Amino acid sequence: MALEITAARPDPALLDLPWSTPLEEWPEDLLAAFPRGISRHIVRFVKISGRVVAIKEIKTDIARREYEMLRNLRRLGLPAVEPWAVVAGRVTPAGDPIDGCLITRHLQFSLPYRALYSQSLRRGTASRLIDALAVLLVRLHLAGFWWGDVSLSNTLFRRDAGAFAAYLVDAETGELREQLSDGQREHDLDIARVNIAGELMDLEAGGLLQEDRDPVEVSERIMTRYRELWQELTGTEIVDTGERWRVDERVRRLNDLGFDVGELEMTTDIGGTSIQIHPKVVDAGHNSRRLLRLTGLDVRENQARRLLNDLDAYRSYFGRQADDEESVAFDWLREIYEPLTRTVPPELPRKIEPAEFFHELLEHRWYLSERHQRDFSLEEVKADYLTHVLPTKPDEKDVLGVDTVEMPVIASED
Amino acid sequence: MATVKFEGATRIYPGNDHPSVDKLDIDIADGEFLVVVGPSGCGKSTALRMLAGLEEVNEGRIWIGDRDVTNLSPKDRDVAMVFQNYALYPHMSVADNMGFALKIAGVEKSEIRKRVEEAAKILDLEPYLERKPKALSGGQRQRVAMGRAIVRSPQVFLMDEPLSNLDAKLRVQTRTQIASLQRRLGVTTVYVTHDQVEAMTMGDRIALLKDGLLQQVASPREMYDRPANVFVAGFIGSPAMNLITVPVTEDGVKFGSHKVEVERGVLSRAGSHVIVGVRPEDVQVRTEDDGLEIEVDVVEELGADAYVYGRPVAKEITLEGSEEGGERPFIARVDGRNVPEKGQHIYVFPNAEHLHVFHQETGERLA
């Protein structure tokens, strides 16, 4: 059988990889990082044409299915890793067939949860990771994706203005439906809960969990956060006819959560004394879309919110409320954002992204002002940050290989 | 422990005209291992998920024991989906790997320990309970993962293609393990697969679905010996049964130049033609003109036996392809010491005792 590579944008460099060798035996000099853990499937990270890709060895039909599924998820605008290629028809020199491979692009500045735990952590990191996962799960469910294997291991996290944004990594068990039933959503939630508890208990058993909170208790948070968010996004609300402002308030609340409302269904009761409102949420990304429109900056939701707040502060500080929003945004970008993020030391781009850097500067300004009881200019803040904070930060651009440390449930000889 | 009953259970997906599962009636006995099998899209996974509470039941009812669970949430049904992607946690002991989900469910420590020990006994894992999974062999690790489902002691186990991501060798190994474990535990189990070999080797009984409709539910032996219709006949058995449309005569059917006697009562229910089914091992092979003339394309030598793959010389005769249409070869098992050559013409006819006769239009079994 001939080697068969399916890719949206194929790179001839793919052909140079040793496909006739099982992934486990690939020479180390090819690998971008050697995975420390063991995952259910063999996974390796390889540098091709200057970028890092993750290669997972898996049965060809499953690889194809997952490739299509990831493409569909991205087409729907959902946060998932980018599938790059499927390699099929692999055989050893002796002619024995080998499983296929799914290749995904490494998500820059993403962190596996275990890597986060190997750093010294701020309090509440577990909760913030779970909050991010809850948002991801709600978004997937709104789009009709039934995940089937929700866990911290199957998710990657990117820093997002002090919080995290979660990305789906493993779509092997997933299915896309028109709509999910309550039973299906609950099933995912139940799996999420058990997996999260297991993952945290494992960290605890390995002495890696610095917080002394009970994993079972922490895992409960996925249920409550998910349900709160789902209710807020999809729940029907009844307001008094005299309180019509509450319709507007609901939309604003959803926007604050980062979601856009596509339609708002309103029905009055027969007597006309109350209105029932039911929003139809389109998707997350309200703030990041707004920032993109105003400034051309493409950043994550919380970062966008943070930047927009600073933009608003800039606008009122200079008394430009009457000015056109776009032109104020243009000036803010030129006078504030770009000077701060453009001139940075060379190691910075490996450690932190510009929008997150800006967020950290704003945080640091607050911290300095609090400590010294005076105002600081952003230039002063930057100088202090570069001297005192940045050197303590790890490189996070390409953190690889510590994603899953589960054991493969694969029988060999007993 | 419990019985399971599907009673006219129907699932219609929104926007679909046809039900994905159509008026399914199955009675599953307490402790039985039922395998639901069928080609992709036949509704087998949907049926399982209806039982699990993951798909709505639009019509009909589902019972577990004497409880009507049709509208119960998955949690309240006391069933466990045995999940193919169970992870093992490297820092936790084998006992904790098996029991941690019970801790989440708020089960008492002593009770957890008790159930883990019981499960370990059944799984031959007792000596390893305090070890880390890394110290176990692959097969033992897999049993730990199964232990996670067992300690929940549900009334029914549900398994949806649990072997689909294993390679062929592991599939066979794990298949045997699951089947023997189920027998030791005696817990009612519903197992979904697309693989008829898996179905034949594992189940006490098999339920075969096609297009959402139950074709037959029976023991593997019954399914093999007395398939209810042409579809079942073509699906069960490997290599597949030969199915050919032949003319009916006064007291039998004509198989090429060979006449096979069939009971008159049977023929009276047929039209001018019937579909005749004959398994490869029930084919008589002659070198002289007696039967249907076949040109040999491939011979598969298996030592004691050989399988002969060929096609009828008469172009107008084609074999029924029960799965995806297209031309199917005629397959005959022959003595390995007496094998025809490729390109040779042979004559075949069915062994009269093992003849399957189906109605030409309805495909239903006549005899």
Image: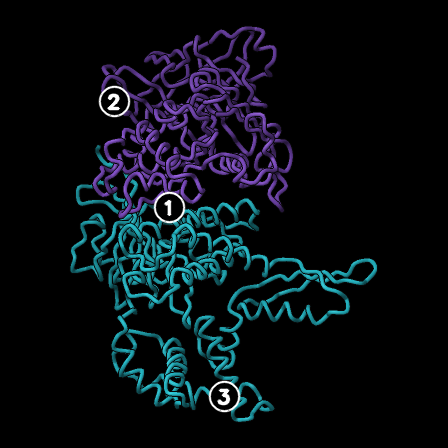
Front residue (pair A114, A29): A114
Same chain under badges 1 and 3? The reply is: yes
Q: Secondary structure at mark 2?
A: loop
Farthest-out residue, bottom: A318
Which of the 4 image quarters holds residue A260?
bottom right
Q: Position of residue B206 (x, y in %)?
A: 46, 24
Q: Are marks 1 and 2 on the same chain?
A: no
Q: Are marks 1 and 3 in contact (CB under 8 Å)?
A: no
Chain assignment, label 3: A
- Chain shown purple: that is B
| Chain of the residue where label 1 is placed in the rendered structure | A
Placement of A330 over or under A209, stated as above or below: below
Vertical comparison of B149 with B89: above or below? above
Q: Secondary structure at mark 3?
A: helix
Q: Which chain is cyan?
A: A
Across and down, in percent, residue A261 comes to 61, 66
Q: Name the residue tied to disc 2.
A: B302
**Which residue is painted at 57% across and 70% down in the image?**
A255
**Which three-letter amino acid code belongs to the residue tagged 2?**
Leu
According to the image, label 3 marks what residue?
A314
CA gap between label 1 and label 3 equals 52 Å
Instruction: Examine the rendering and report whether any part of residue B88 can be seen.
Output: yes
